[in-house]
Image: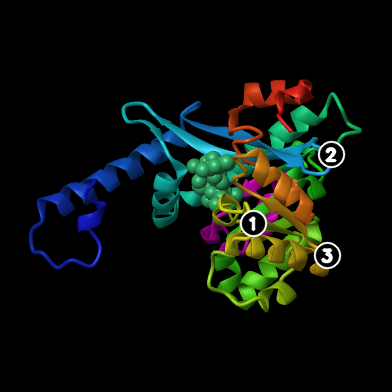
Amino acid sequence: RAKAAGEGTFARYDPAMHSGLVDRLQLAADLRRALETTGELVLHYQPTIELRSGTVTGFEALVRWRHPTRGEISPADFIPLAESTGLIRPLGQWVLAEASRQCVEWSRPAPDRPLTMAVNVSGRQFDQTDLPAIVAGVLADTGLPAERLCLEMTESVLMNDTEENLAVLLSLKQIGVKLAIDDFGTGYSSLAYLRRFPVDTLKIDRSFVERIGGATPDAALARTIVQLGQSLGMATVAEGIEQYAQFLALRRMGCDVGQGYYFSRPLPAREAGALLRDPAAVAV
Ligand code: C2E
Ligand code: MG
Ligand code: MG
Ligand code: MG
């Protein structure tokens, strides 16, 4: 609400700014409490679809906060708050554990069909030198095979090109988890980091998928990212597929996997599980 009036202003007394700060402090306190409460923070799961075959390969876990008085708060609003307060560490650890546990549960009836689980990991979590130990602990506790867990990071993590950061990514690779660059193509970094960092998957940002029909610059960029992935031996995933035409265009380009409202919105665990038992539930 008062966010626009916040940063960078020097007003001595700005009631809007005051309420904004109080608001954020209150929300941070609420988030701290939510982390200790069952059921306020939940994960929704959006299926990922192999474009060639139309089969569900797994899910991306997306956190939801059902605030007792404010209703559902979008992760776009509370993840930054979690990052600035340090709560992203316990929150991120809970997401990792819960998503991994869920993946194992869903895999049990069909061990021959390995499902993958993609988890968003904030740059603040990659700053933790103990992130590899946390991930290894979650894998050990849940029994999820490492290669079935994919950690999604934004380009900013790779732009933060420090030795510590590289060491964390290399240890994660050593554990055997997959690493994906989320929202690929929207950052400002050079492509050189693709050589330096052990990345498995490029996730094409939704903005390129939106206007992919016809001979648009976005179609050319999407195709280029798919080809880049292919030449570097990386898988490509397109996010934000909403229309049949976008699905067809991406499949024709050779993009491996897609996700988006066209196939399914992110779903509560129960519905996502039902979708696994009824493959016809996903439109292709
Ligand atoms: P993201 O990782 O890029 O996730 C994709 C976002 O696009 C999700 O929004 C998803 O609901 C939405 N989406 C999926 N398909 C479509 C589509 O066809 N059309 C449109 N318009 N949108 C689609 P959501 O769930 O609100 O999450 C927003 C962002 O919040 C995520 O972007 C991610 O960066 C962050 N986030 C979500 N969960 C977590 C988490 O557990 N940890 C961290 N660190 N970040 C998270
Ligand atoms: Mg993501
Ligand atoms: Mg994304
Ligand atoms: Mg995105």
Task: Name the secondary structure under disc 2.
Answer: loop
For residue 57, above or below residue 194? above
Q: Is residue 255 magenta?
A: no
Cα–Cα span, label 2 and label 1? 19 Å
Q: Which residue is drawn at 79% across and 57% down?
A: 175
Residue ID for mark 1 = 204
Residue 13, position as x, y percentages in the image:
8, 58
Q: What residue type is labelled 3?
A: Gly
Total labels drawn: 3
Task: Name the secondary structure under disc 1.
Answer: strand
Task: Report the colour scheme.
Answer: rainbow
Image mark for residue 53? 2
When asked about the image quadrant of residue 201, the answer is bottom right
Q: In which quarter of the image is the N terminus?
A: top left
Residue ID for mark 3 = 233
Q: Residue at x 57, y 73 (%)?
A: 159
* Residues rendered magenta in the picture: 118-138
Q: Which of marks 2 and 3 is in front?
A: 2
Q: Is residue 120 left or right of residue 50?
A: left
Residue 204, position as x, y percentages in the image:
64, 56
Of pointers 2 and 1, the one earlier in the residue sequence: 2
For residue 199, above or below residue 134? below
When asked about the image quadrant of residue 105, the answer is top right
When asked about the image quadrant of residue 60, the answer is top right
Q: Which amino acid does label 1 sit on?
A: Ile
Q: Which residue is drawn at 36% across and 26% down?
A: 68
Q: Is residue 122 magenta?
A: yes
Circle 3 Cα neighbour tier, 10 Å, few/some/many (<14 / 14–19 / ≥20)? few
Cα–Cα span, label 3 and label 1? 15 Å
